[in-house]
């Protein structure tokens, strides 16, 4: 990316990524860091290997990020975070709401209002809450507000009932927030990605899962983390400032043809009959 | 408020087989005078009439008409005018499948032919109905499929035609609302018909059944009944919509479902 100059200059601009010390969030942080941004990464469980993260940022030619603990569902943590950013910056350029934490559903018995509301508190509401906190503490909304989503609302992922519902809520808010804030020079968009090969994917679906997908699709089934980070950067690059209120899917076209008809067409090569 | 179809004219293109026929039977059961068009003269009229008689429906009128030819469309309207002052329901059902082989064989001609047969008749028939009868049908239905959103081998042209029909459907809904016309589209998954077997080969139903894709197949009657419901009077507040008759199949037709059931399917 460094060879093409973006219209927006991110040098020393504040970029906040929630759930930013792993997976998609970390990839997003790296993409902005390589443009010179001062990236703030939040995490909850204290499991971040800060040294390794700092090293990865420096290797990408960026400055080491500021890593802060914050529970996305606790408002005081959000306030403290904005205060911390305020020490060095007059405003927040980009907010990427990435934390997703929802109950995995095995059967109808797992549908409980309380656990659903907890899922919403972690996976949908922070998108709104952090925007509000940024405005309150820093005096303005971030210029770019983004959230990460998946195609779960439209296609089946085992156990993803609540995740998908939360993403759907967030996507609806995205459309509304875009109308509320466009006149304030704010863009609100959501980036959906298909599964990325991460620790949490293995934790959710088991060890056999990845080999299965590769066997019955190919290596292209997965989206690369860097591709997600780069797409987020593109949405905030200045090239796409007329795009707001949109849900953009990053899936290499896999979702469209992930069905039995594709397997039937290529049944010989997959050894299916 | 439920509609009384006794003696009312219902026109269905490509109505002598498959989905069109099932739709015709659904209206026939309610006493409608059903007009079924077909192009190839392959309809076994005796069998067709028997199917209507079996359910106590009035005998349908079968007309030969190529949906892409304006003269044929005019002749269809003239024939219906002999017995009726208006057409209550028009179902645009004909779909001619041009199978696409690969990008090198894509041709504008095949695309245009696809559109002429599978998208434009919704508009052409509607216009002609208005011209001949002085009024639009109360219900316009476009027969669509989930092809625009889901992969079917070689179905590019069909999918394009369906999406064009759906877009026109939304606009017609807007334009014809003042006339009291409802326009809706019904998307179906595959129905095992002669034409589907011709495109995907005889092996394909067994393959889908083996891998739990039973919901892939929809019974033609389920589609006919859904269309009847849309025209029943119970759903008159709905217009410009695309309704899927798919048993929730496309949502879970993916590798995740197969992975979850991999032992059962021997994968």
Image (cartoon, coloured by chain):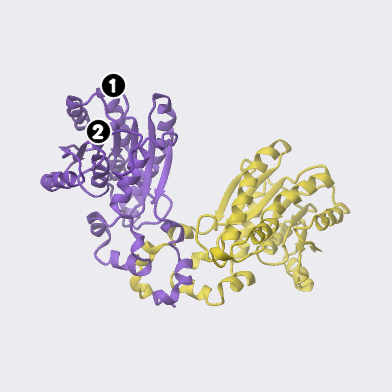
Chain colours: A purple, B yellow
Q: Which residue is mark 1?
A: A139
- Can you see residue A84? yes
Q: Measured from the top left, where is residue A199 in percent x and y?
A: 22, 56
**Mark 1 vs 2, N-terminal side:** 2
As rendered, which of B11 and A273 lies closer to the eye?
Answer: A273
Q: Residue placed farthest to the left in the image?
A: A51
What chain is tagged by disc 2?
Answer: A
Q: Quadrant of the C terminus of chain B?
A: bottom left
As rendered, which of B6 and A218 lies closer to the eye?
Answer: A218
Residue at image point 25% right, 35% down: A15
Could you confirm whether marks 1 and 2 are on the same chain? yes
Nearer the camera: disc 1 or disc 2: 2
Q: Quadrant of the N terminus of chain B?
A: top right
Q: Is residue B188 left or right of residue A251?
A: right
Q: Is residue B198 left or right of residue A93?
A: right
Q: Which residue is mark 2?
A: A11
Assign a secondary structure to mark 1: loop
Assign a secondary structure to mark 2: loop
- Can you see residue A170? no
Q: Which mark is residue A121?
A: none
Where is residue A124, by image quadrant? top left
Q: Measured from the top left, where is residue B8 in percent x and y?
A: 78, 52
What chain is tagged by disc 1?
Answer: A
Q: Measured from the top left, where is residue A4 in percent x and y?
A: 33, 42
Judge whether A256 appears above or below B86 on screen: below
């Amino acid at each position: 990316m460094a060879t093409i100059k973006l219209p927006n200059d991110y040098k020393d601009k504040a970029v906040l990524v929630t759930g930013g010390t792993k997976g998609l969030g970390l990839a997003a942080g790296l993409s902005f860091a390589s443009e010179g941004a001062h990236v703030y990464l939040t995490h909850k469980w204290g499991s971040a290997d800060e040294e390794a993260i700092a090293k990865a940022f420096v290797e990408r030619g960026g400055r080491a990020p500021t890593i802060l603990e914050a529970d996305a569902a606790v408002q005081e943590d959000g306030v403290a975070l904005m205060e911390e950013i305020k020490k060095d910056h007059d405003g927040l350029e980009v907010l990427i709401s990435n934390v997703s934490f929802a109950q995995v559903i095995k059967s109808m018995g797992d549908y409980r209002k309380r656990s659903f509301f907890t899922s919403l508190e972690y996976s949908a509401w922070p998108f709104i809450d952090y925007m509000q906190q940024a405005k309150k503490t820093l005096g303005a909304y971030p210029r770019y507000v983004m959230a990460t989503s998946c195609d779960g609302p439209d296609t089946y992922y085992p156990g993803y009932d609540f995740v998908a519902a939360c993403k759907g809520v967030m996507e609806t808010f995205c459309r509304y927030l875009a109308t509320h804030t466009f006149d304030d020079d704010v863009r609100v968009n959501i980036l959906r990605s298909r599964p990325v090969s991460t620790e949490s994917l293995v934790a959710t679906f088991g060890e056999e899962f990845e080999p299965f997908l590769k066997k019955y699709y190919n290596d292209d089934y997965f989206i690369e983390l860097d591709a997600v980070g780069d797409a987020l950067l593109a949405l905030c690059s200045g090239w796409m400032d007329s795009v707001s209120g949109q849900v953009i899917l990053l899936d290499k076209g896999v979702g469209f043809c992930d069905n039995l008809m594709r397997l039937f067409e290529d049944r010989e090569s997959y050894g299916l009959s | 408020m439920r509609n009384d179809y006794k003696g009312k004219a219902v026109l269905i293109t490509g109505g002598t087989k498959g989905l069109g026929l099932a739709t015709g039977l659904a209206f026939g059961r309610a006493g409608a005078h059903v007009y079924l068009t077909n192009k190839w003269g392959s309809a076994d009229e005796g069998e067709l009439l028997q199917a209507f008689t079996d359910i106590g429906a009035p005998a349908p009128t079968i007309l030969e008409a190529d949906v892409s030819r304006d003269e044929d469309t005019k002749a269809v309207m003239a024939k219906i005018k002999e017995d009726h002052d208006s057409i209550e329901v028009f179902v645009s059902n004909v779909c001619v499948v041009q199978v696409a082989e690969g990008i090198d064989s894509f041709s504008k001609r095949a695309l245009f032919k696809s559109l002429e047969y599978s998208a434009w008749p919704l508009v052409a028939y509607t216009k002609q109905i208005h011209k001949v009868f002085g009024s639009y049908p109360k219900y316009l239905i476009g027969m669509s499929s989930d092809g625009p959103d889901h992969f079917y081998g070689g179905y590019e042209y069909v999918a394009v035609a369906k999406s064009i029909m759906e877009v026109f459907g939304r606009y017609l809904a807007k334009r014809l609302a003042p006339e009291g016309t409802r326009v809706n589209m019904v998307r179906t998954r595959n129905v095992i018909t002669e034409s589907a077997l011709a495109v995907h080969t005889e092996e394909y139903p067994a393959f889908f059944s083996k891998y739990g894709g039973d919901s892939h197949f929809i019974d033609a009657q389920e589609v006919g009944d859904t269309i009847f419901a849309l025209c029943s009077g119970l759903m008159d507040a709905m217009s410009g919509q695309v309704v899927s008759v798919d048993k929730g199949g496309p949502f879970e037709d993916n590798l995740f479902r197969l992975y979850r059931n991999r032992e059962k399917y021997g994968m």
